[in-house]
Image (cartoon, coloured by chain):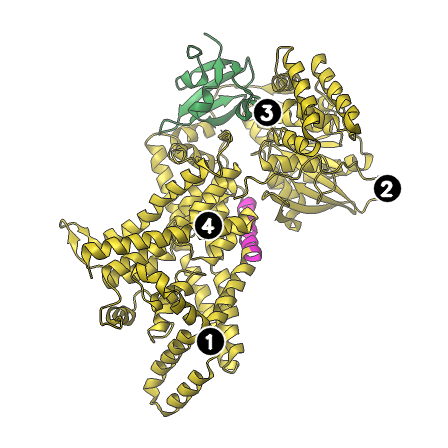
Chain colours: A yellow, B green
Amino acid sequence: MPAVAPAAPPFSHTSSASPRTVRQQYTVAVVGNPNTGKTTLFNALTGLTQHTGNYPGVTVESALGEFTVDGQLFLAVDLPGTYSLSPRAPDEMVAVSILLGHNPTHTPPDVVLCVLDATNLDRNLYLFTQLVELGRPVVVALTMVDLAHKQGIEIDIPALADTLGVPVVPVQANRRIGVPALKQAVSRAARTALAPRPCVHFPPSFTQAVTDLSQALEQHDGHPPLSHFLVQRLLIDAGGPIERAFTDRWGATAASLLYAARRQLAATGTSAPQIEVESRYQWISEVVARTVRRSSVGTPTWSDRIDRIVTHKLWGMAIFLGVMAITFQSIFSWAVPVMDAIDVLFQSLGRYIAHVVPEGPVRSLVVDGVIGGVGAVIVFVPQIAVLFGLIAILEDSGYMARAAFLMDRVMASFGLSGRSFIPLLSSFACAVPGIMATRTIEDRRDRITTILIAPLMSCSARLPVYVLFISAFIPAQTLWGIVGLQGLTLFALYMVGLAVAPLVALTLKRTVFRGEPVPFLLELPPFKIPAWRVVLFRMYDRSWAFIRRAGTIILATTVLVWAVSYYPNQAHIAEEYRARRALASPEEQERLQAEEAGARLRASFLGQAGRAIAPIVHPLGWDWKIGMATLASFPAREVVIAALGTIYNLGSGQDEGSVELREAMRTERWPDGRPVYTPAVALSLMVFFALCCQCGATLATIKRETGSWWYAAFTFTYMTAFAYLSALAVYQIGNRLIGS
Amino acid sequence: MSLQRTLADLTPQEEGRIQAVIGTDTLAQRLSEIGFTPGQTVRLIRFAPLGDPMQIRIRGFSIALRRSEAQRIVLQPT
């Protein structure tokens, strides 16, 4: 498995600001701490012109958008939220490499738009002090001014602008207040192209060390000069990604110069990181003393009161369970009517086309391949929209961070953090929105681990499979007078995935994803009323992203499965049934049609493949027909029911409640007369379906979210292997214990 | 070392003043960057219902830290 992919290396090429002639467009990088309202501001600036994509090489989401000021076009890029420019995680590396102009797909920004949260000015200014050292024009957008006012924090904005040496524009992005003024300020900054002077003064020993190292590196092998910013970061961030890129690029001798410089600095008594942090905060405390006035310090706000309740041992947990129940319910059942309607719509569309297009490969491709495939994509959209609407409400209100706070202990016991809880819970309804919800997990290794175990959660598509087999083969007995055997089996199947997931997570975190843990550091922002614009935009954005990115793959898979179950075209079967249908009575037509479909399927490539894998599935207690139905359901597990229906000549319209299908399965015999389906076979089948990754949409989503087919292939392989071995064990043990 | 009082030793609603953040790794650097600097006042608001993590108030904002992370923040003796 590839380790955490390195971000675009900062030493790949040197670049300088592009010549400032007449410009087609200017680029603006939007930078800020997490939870500063940065994304809301970005949305307000760019509206629906924005589109999201992944940065090359890393799977960090980038949002691009544009806006115009007096006819001049500006291209805005929303950088990942970061507390400092000392990059540690891949997202931070992306932010830094774009700001430095080292990212091959982005021109260096003409203006850096720094978002500062007025309620948190100290901490936000830390990033600002680093940004002004990049040598590019900076404009400050001051957000949350209204909230700060309510907390008794008053900021003297003209004085702040004066001290920082850059324009400061107060904004309330969710109400579009201040946005036009901000655009004007950005436009002026781009045209004048004046960079502010670095504001923080470091101790002479440190400045000297930076200069010395710069010169030493330049003399050594005549390297092109590095920016002051990069040399400073090299000196400070021991073991960070900038250092790794540096040593990879320039080798051991250059590295030894760096280590010598660090040792020299350490000999003065304080470490480089300490010098940096203390110098910056020293300056910040002076700025804050001059420009910020706090009154009514210590009075609990209403946000504090809510916090007291939602993190309470009893009430907090009760509210948490309630919120989770609503979340789960919303995807599990509220989205269902819409999904059913979509199903009906596509089925009637298919029937209509079947009427107007003559029978043959074209009709079959359009009806079963294309319309079926498009339907298979659209059917996920209600779940995604509903879940992301809820997640946006939970996040924007500030509750999401509290949920992670409550659940962190539980998730930490298998190597994850509280942020993994909601994605995993959502996966019980459907892994597709669950995997998309992992975006809220900041640590990449945690995020990928969560993605890889999410498909183990028993999703709603598994339920019909369980229901069919349990009702057909598990006796409706009660154990010890209270526990129903059927209910117990269903519960056990849900537990199978829950038992395997922590094992997989722990194994991954101790092997491929081991390494220095990324600090938990979960900020608990003040509660606020969620902005409906944010919520609606998230629903639209996530649904559309799914359709565009995962949709094509799902559609392609559906067409592929259609092809292998349609071809080779068996002319003699068609002939035979045409002849028989001509002779049959009207009542028999439907039965004959189902029989023909069964005959065709058995003779198709898929049928041949089913026979070919018969020796492989035999140890699981399955015959070739079960093997083939299982093969057919790899793109979507719920297909197994329709596939079994077709194989047993009942037609594809069977569902989990079908009495005929249950009967057909019960009467199915091996050539020697033994029944094919025994309770042990049913259990082995259900365990296989519980653990196997039979979902093309999930794999497509994993590919999209991780940016690599590798992770999709890994998920598929480990789950299928787990499923096979577990089904094998269940059958072999079950067969000996309960017999046939 | 174990005699030093750390952030993890506070009781809910108790305040302390930071003496130092121990270590030079990512965690230590990140804690310093977000404002855990010597001389700053920190308040332990509460522990999560399951005992970990804990909610801390510093420089006017709230943040959750795990006990193991809070143990890296040494407080001035009272």
Residue located 38% across and 76% down the image: A598
* Screen quadrant of the C terminus of chain A: bottom left
Q: Which residue, given by chain and number where applicable, does mark 2 sit on?
A: A21
Q: Which mark is residue A217?
A: none
Residue A316: percent from the left, percent from the top? 36, 33
Q: Which residue, given by chain and number where applicable, does mark 1 sit on?
A: A351
Residue A327: percent from the left, percent from the top? 41, 46
Q: Is residue A171 visible?
A: no
Q: Give the mark, 1 or 3, whose residue is nearer the N terminus.
A: 3
Q: Is residue A720 left or right of residue A389?
A: left
Look at the picture and state if A72 lies above or below A586.
above
Chain letter behind tag 3: A
Residue A238: percent from the left, percent from the top? 61, 24
Helix, strand or loop at disc 4? helix
Q: Are marks 2 and 3 on the same chain?
A: yes
Disc 4 and disc 3 in contact, CB within 8 angstroms: no
Helix, strand or loop at disc 3? helix
Q: CA distance from mark 1 to mark 2?
A: 61 Å
Q: Amino acid at mark 1?
A: Arg
Q: Amino acid at mark 2?
A: Thr
In-front residue for pair A337/A609:
A609
Q: Is residue A134 magenta?
A: no
Q: CA distance from mark 2 to mark 4?
A: 51 Å
Q: Are marks 4 and 3 on the same chain?
A: yes
Q: CA distance from mark 4 to mark 3?
A: 40 Å
Q: Residues within 10 Å of mark 3 (few under 14, many from 20)?
A: many
Q: Give the mark, 2 or 4, whose residue is nearer the N terminus.
A: 2
Badge nearest the viewer, 4 or 1: 4
The boundaries of the magenta stretch are: A532-549
Q: Which residue, given by chain and number where applicable, does mark 3 sit on?
A: A123
Residue located 25% across and 62% down the image: A471
